Amino acid sequence: MNEISDTPVLEIKGLSVLLPDGADREFAIEEVSFSIGRSEIVCIVGESGSGKSVTAFTVMGLIPKKDLVPVAGEILLHGEDLLDKSDRQMRRLRGKKMGMVFQEPMTALNPVIKVGDQIAEILEIHANMSASARKKRVIETMEDVSLPEPVKMYDSYPHQLSGGQRQRIMIAMALVLEPGLLIADEPTTALDVTTQAEVLELIRDIQARHGTGVMFITHDFGVVADIADRVVVMQNGKVVEQGTRDEILSAPSHPYTKMLIGSVPSLTPPNRPIPEVAETALEAKALNKTYGRVGLFENGRMVKAAQDVELILRRGETLGVVGESGSGKSTVARCMVRLIDPTSGDINVAGTNIAQMAESELRAYRQKIQIVFQDPYRSLNPRRTVGQSIVEGPMNFGLSGTEAQSRAENLMRIVGLAPEALTRFPHQFSGGQRQRICIARALAMEPRVLIADEAVSALDVSVQAQVLRLLQDVRERYDLAMLFITHDLRVAAQICDRIMVMQRGVVVEEGRTSEVYANPQHPYTRSLLNAAPGRETNFARYS
Amino acid sequence: MYLYILKRVLSTIPVVVIVVLFVFLMLRLAPGDPAAVIAGDYATAEDVERIREQLGLNDAIPVQMYRWIAQLGSGDLGTAIFSKLPVTTLIGQRLEPTLLLSLTTIVFTVLIAVPLGTLAAYKAGSWIDRFVMLFSVAGFSVPVFVLGYILIYVLAMQLQILPVQGYKSPFEHGFWVFLRHMVLPTMTLSVIYIALIARMTRASVQEILQEDYVRTARAKGQSEFKILMRHALRNAAVPIVTVIGLGIALMIGGVVVTESVYNIPGLGRLVLDAVLARDYPVIQGLILFFSFVYILINLLIDLSYTFFDPRIRY
Amino acid sequence: MPDHSQDAIMADAVLSEHEDPSLLAGMLNNRAIFWGGGLLILFALIAAIGPFLTLDPTELNPIKRLKSPSAEAWFGSDFLGRDIFSRVIYGARVSLVVGIAVALISVGIGLILGLVAGYVRVLDAVIMRTMDGLMSIPAILLAIALISLSGATLGTVILAIVIPEVPRVVRLVRAVVLTVREEPYVEAAIAAGTRLPLILKRHILPNTIAPLIVQATYVCASAMLTESILGFLGAGIPPEIPSWGNIMSEGRTYFQISPWIIFFPGIGLALTVLAVNIVGDGLRDTLDPRIARKI
């Protein structure tokens, strides 16, 4: 083995970074050590608060020293300690010896500068090239990342490109000077699963060709399964385990790692007994929702968010609505709850059509369908105690204060929280606990139908597993019908009896989950399933 | 983009309508008898009746409305009660000093306020920043005329380096004499405007420096200064230009006072003379004039966004 | 039925035991509010009690006219021999009363209009266009015109200053309403069958209070300035009532000989308005209404 290629691109030894006073722990990251070799993709995995992003930003030197202070350890980039460097020296390294790609492609590019010029900026800073030479190099790089029509795209502005294209521009920017190290901080988390697959492939490809060492931060074990050479697991600022991909995924040793991997839902739907046909709890017929008007003062663009959607949900079953962004799944959910009004079509709740009902009549039916939203941090009024939020609904329907209170206490127990906590405010609970409270709030209405609109998407994978368990138990206990909206194929596989796949407002396929996953009929469904990261991997199972 | 331009132009129409309507209603809905108030305490019944006739208040409301709109449509802003001159003529006579004062003020303000605000945001938390913030709060708090008198006292009376008051047209007396007489009025009028714009510039630039794309630029190894110039300011252009436009309303108010303090024979003084003479049609005509100017300027600023923001262009 | 409590407690990172630090404590800690507010309270006290301790501000004393500040007359005397110090103290009353009255009234009107604009789509366009129109008319001119039409009394002056201040408040409230309406917790309340009045009271209004308080202080400062300008121009409160604007207006002719007639009330006004503005800034930083900053 060649000496040169044995030197790791990046070596972190015992790195500790202090948090400012008043934080919930002393260190952002503590005694973190790992290395990244040439041509190696190392995935840093962890849940929120694990310190993975802090590590990345400290390496790049992007955190102002006065906010988070590195107090111990070394960061060796090609053997040189970055912590010793001055700001000026770090600036010379950034972009040239190490590049970074961030999570949000929509905001990472300057909206008023052409994308080509933004890539050229790196060359301007670090390389001595003429303007035309720069432009030529930029176009080469854009071809390298498989962007269509690079010459034309050079002059485009970010808002004219899709999320996937913007991320490719970011990758082009990071790699144009062929740095030895690429840091990717959740680069595909904000992308659709099909786009994610493309971008992951791109990263793998480029990395192999240029020999770049990659620090890939993610919380998604499917992604880890697909691209990692080695894995570093972090929890609460410490590295709890590291090893090769196979070691970690099939035979993890640390309990936390085991718990994490055990929480990843399998892509294979379990065998479910086919239930006897129960009564229809919720039905949608020819449901349409169209936005936009053709007129002098509108763009003239009409968006058909939902087109002729047919949906039947029966008591005792969970129906999943799966799709990427823009598929219309959330629109359908919100129409069902009449948070938005459908343009046309029927929505039948226990036999009555509520699609066009006036608010005063509608109110009685609201009690029968309840919804849990995606963002636990915005779903509860921060100024009211959680108890007040839970009893609000039942009291609207005539329950007295005491009756509603005892119902609330009971429900808190069922969702796994102490009834005494009813007097607390939302900010005193974690995200997962807040979702439980939202579930309790929905159940307080004693509905027949529960709609979960991406209800676990914003939660860490371990918390997600618990809340999913809770949802399933609750559904059984109250014999509810559940409409489960998600973009996550693994979650859908595990929790849904039947699923509907939507693409751009249209239902393209539906059926029993096991059948659809085993034999997808529609090309879109097939592409979705093919794109799911970690498809081939068998994650270790711990019950 | 052309759709945007069309929309912007068309959207000024309701605003103009509201202004016209409001001014119309003001006279007619005021409590008490406006004609009597205008006529003054010592007026006789005939005086009041004469004024009422002159203002056209005796006709039915729809007739008044029609006459009003027809009148405006032909560019007639009304006629002064006492001098009997059309308001437009009066405006023409007094336009030059106000226009020049406004221009020097805007130029002076932008040249000082934008760099000041940008510097304050760049060095957020430093003494420069604190100084700018304090200055802008103070500038906002001192009444325009008090500031004017302080400046006169210090610079004109005590130090005697500038004239106390008065206006000299550049076309008659030459540029430098004009400028000498303009220094104090411009400084007086600018302070509140500078305070506003420096503050908004600082807020906008500071907000932009927290944006993700600035972080991307840092990740590329770009220097802080170039980030400020190339990335931050270009995005701050829209909010800064917007507030310059909005501040014009403040400036117009200040013009009235400044011209009074420095004895400048401009439109501001015209307002005051009209107030003292209780010449309501002149006041009304000037309100319309200034409002239309303000609406026009803000329209131009809206249209300028197409230059600054490619998201509107494409 | 499985017990989910273990899950809930284990998954929890930190269950915060401590309460939110009291808002009042936070406000008192803020230096701006502390000093600015202190200054204001001092001025208000002087304005309230002062008149009982000073000379008669309307007492004419032609022998003592145009005297410079001295031990006898702290701020000097004006052209009619009236004691300027007393007049300044009396004037403080008027300015503070006008400032507070305008702030309260315009915030009240603005709140109602803003709520309506935010919630009733049909009226939204009408209200906002009207506000745009009002904002196009320079405030001083509008006030002058209104006063010249209805005569100058304390009431009409207050009303004339209120009208141009309302549009900004309406915009602010409307922005808050539109933002809060989108929040999932409001949607959850709708889905739970809560009626509109309760939604407004429980969920929307509490979010408007902080930005409104901040805006009210700015309106107060602006109103005091406008009142003084109107007085200075002779278009405001009648000269019998000593307001800072009036006093300064009367001092114009004598400025070159007795500049203190303008300076003392002017500085008093500037300090008061400065104090109000500083308190407003401090409140804004403490209460953090992000929307207010964008208007």
Image (cartoon, coloured by chain):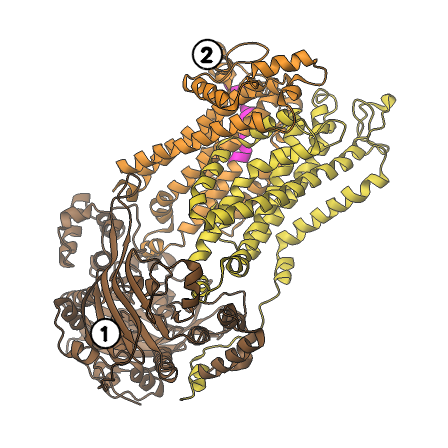
Chain colours: A brown, B orange, C yellow
> Is residue C8 or residue A404 the one in the foreground?
A404
The residue at the far front in this view is A351
| Residue picked out by circle 1 | A499
* Residue B239 left/right relative to A310: right
C-alpha separation, residue under disc 1 versus residue under disc 2: 82 Å
Q: Position of residue C145 (x, y in %)?
A: 59, 26
Location of residue A195 with respect to A517 vertically, above or below: above
Marks 1/2 in contact by CB < 8 Å: the verdict is no
Query: Residue flagged by tag 2: what amino acid is it?
Result: Phe
Q: Quadrant of residue B298?
A: top left
- Few, some or many C-alpha atoms within 10 Å of disc 1 (few <14, some 14-19, many ≥20)? many
Disc 1 versus disc 2: nearer the observer = 1
Q: Is residue A268 above or below residue A372?
A: below
The image quarter in which residue A355 lies: bottom left
Q: Does residue B185 belong to the magenta stretch? A: yes
Q: Pointer 2: what residue?
A: B171
SS for tag 1? Answer: strand
* Magenta span of residues: B179-193
The type of residue carrying mark 1 is Ile
